[in-house]
Image (cartoon, rainbow, N blue to C red):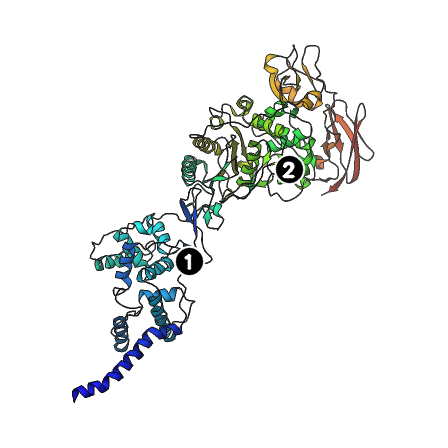
Amino acid sequence: MLRAKIRHLLPAVAALAVAAAGLYYGLPFCVDAPDISPPPESAVYDRHGELMGYVAGPDGYHCHPLSALPQELARALVAAEDKRFYLHGGVDPLALARALWQQLTGSGRSGASTITMQVAKMYSPPAPRNARTKIREMLQARRLEMQHNKEELLLAYLNRADFSNLCRGAECAARFCFGKGAAELTTPEAALLAAMVKAPSRLNPLRHPQAALARRNYILHRLDADTQPALGVAVHTISAPAAADGIHGRLTLDATLQRRVAAIAREEVEKLRERNVSQAAVVVADNRTGEVLAALPAACPESARGGALDGTTSRRSAGSTLKPFVYLMAFSHGAWPGTIMADVPTLYSNAQGIQAPRNYNERYQGPITIRRALACSQNIPAMEALERFGGGQTFLTLLRQLGFCIDGTGSEYGLGLAIGNAHVSLTELVCAYSTLARNGRFLPLQHRLPLQSAIPAQLLPAEHSYRISHILADRAARAATFGPAPALSFPWPVAAKTGTSSNYRDNWCLGYTAEYTVGVWVGNFDNSPMHNISGISGAGPIFHRVMSALHEQTPPTFPTRPEGLHDVEIDSRTGTPATTHTPPECRATEIATAQNLEAMPQAVYDSRGRAVLSSRYTEWYATAGLEHLYALDATCNSGRNAAILIPSHGTTLGLDPSLPGEGRLVELQSTLPPATTIWHSGSLRILHRNGKWFAELKPGTHTIHASAPPDKHAQSTFRVLKD
């Protein structure tokens, strides 16, 4: 009888079993299985394949998928989140029953989600947290279990989980918290990461260390491991270098060099803290390929004073760093290193009005060769060269060809373009200086591998570029202003140029050998002035140490001297070939082309062999104390274009009742020889007192004329307003 009943029940039981199996294995196929492919790679590597950091994804998180399951972390995760993970098929009936009982009785609240269900949730679009979503996740978990093994599911979890601190995935979290990969974690370290996934914000070890510690020790207890009183977290930077520009992949950077440059820059900035120096940026380029080998955006990235900013791309006042290119342009317009410039107090009139620039050290050297003017970084000769040889717009065109992104026109900048009123970036400067290092062949800088194919273009004449390099490496020429300058001195030839912006807000040091160009900026991102720190004392020491490090293994060479250049001994007072009467202290060897030799002007000497100076040098000559070398002809034209400087053409002047005589008397100045210049005006009274000329102003529009023999003439029309 019983057997008969059993025989009759067997088909029903079998049918139920088949139905249950169908539901268990078939129903999951009613939902789409989530794609658990690894999230997008965000790792950045150096030229040798060394990991340098991670770029942030669209959600701001860093992510680096694991390729293999870290066993210690997997063990901790299972202990923390799903102890029966290896026993169930995606849904844990015991956990479901416990959660349901607690819900009905109000005796507690525990989750029923398995690791596989959490994977289904992680890899699916966001959805409302309700019963329908929960059922869908269960079905998806079942399907995932049928399509993937347990290791693949754990790997998917660890690759997508939020570990706080903008770390998505265990690999980034391990490197952020402990400075090593997830596979290298110890049991306590793995337990901490496993603790964080339960509540990334509440269990963030940086913000809530005690809560994180308690959860970590709970997991260690479940692993039968010894608990510890400290978390052991040591935060490491995982952000990719600024050169990555938000794109993962391989960079041209050398991670070892990058770390060394960072250490050097930090050490030197620390030495200058008391002088209000807070930051430095460094760029190193390989001149042979255009590859950027190091790009340090900030020496102190943790600083509250803009440590997150990028000093390699920030645009700052150029200081004197553009002067080499002013003289290079001058060479293309007929000048050469022996050309004489006037280094004397000078007034300039342009669209910005009257300028009275000063040299950095407020000293003037009178007649000076371009070699010495550039080596000593004198301001007046640089502005003179810009005015005489090409002008501002031509110079802007050259700078843009060299890679500078400078807006505006030459007239908007005026002659100040020669001494730093344009804003440039460190990367732009390194690109331009590396062109000089290649004797005028231009290559764009590159930050990524594989390199974009680029053929060097001969942008600048090789002989001009080489002569600029030769000047920048001339210690003797530099010494008159900078002394021995240890920061720029090496056992081998190095071309170097420093720059300091007004009020010591920025200083620079750029230099190169044939192999490498190094650029350094030192200052403050908040634009506050440093305390008497120049390019020599601020950026210079960093430059010296970085350049020395680069050539520890690579023998240094200098740009090759092009053919067609000749050495000629000149009289440095006149820039003409030396004679038997040239004093030893005025003899100098200079580099000339055949065209330079043919175009050399005729020097003028007096009967005692002294170089005769024009009226341009009158004020300087009176205090220089060099009467044994120079004679002054106050009637000789200055060589500048005839122009009235005060009052300049097109200006508006005002009478001020608060000044004596309402400020009616204005001293007249022009580019003509003062000793022979005659002034007159049809509407104003002109006065001559103590060798100086004055105009007595009155309201209205007036024209003043200045003339000097033999046939020099200038005029200026201006307005006078009564306050």
- What residue is shown with label 2? 398
Q: In this view, does 219 lie to the left or right of 403?
A: left
- Outermost residue, right direction? 682
Judge the density around disc 1: few (<14), some (14-19), many (≥20) Cα neighbours within 10 Å.
some
| Label annotation for residue 320 | none
- What residue is shown with label 1? 39
What is the x, y in percent for residue 79? 25, 61
What is the x, y in percent for residue 510? 52, 33
Q: Could you tell me if residue 401 is visible in this image? A: yes
Give amino acid for label 2: Leu
The image quadrant of residue 195 is bottom left
The image quadrant of residue 346 is top right
Give amino acid for label 1: Pro
| Residue visible at 45% across and 53% down in the picture | 56
What is the x, y in percent for residue 191? 27, 56
Q: Distance between the residues labelled 1 and 2?
A: 46 Å
Judge the density around disc 2: few (<14), some (14-19), many (≥20) Cα neighbours within 10 Å.
some
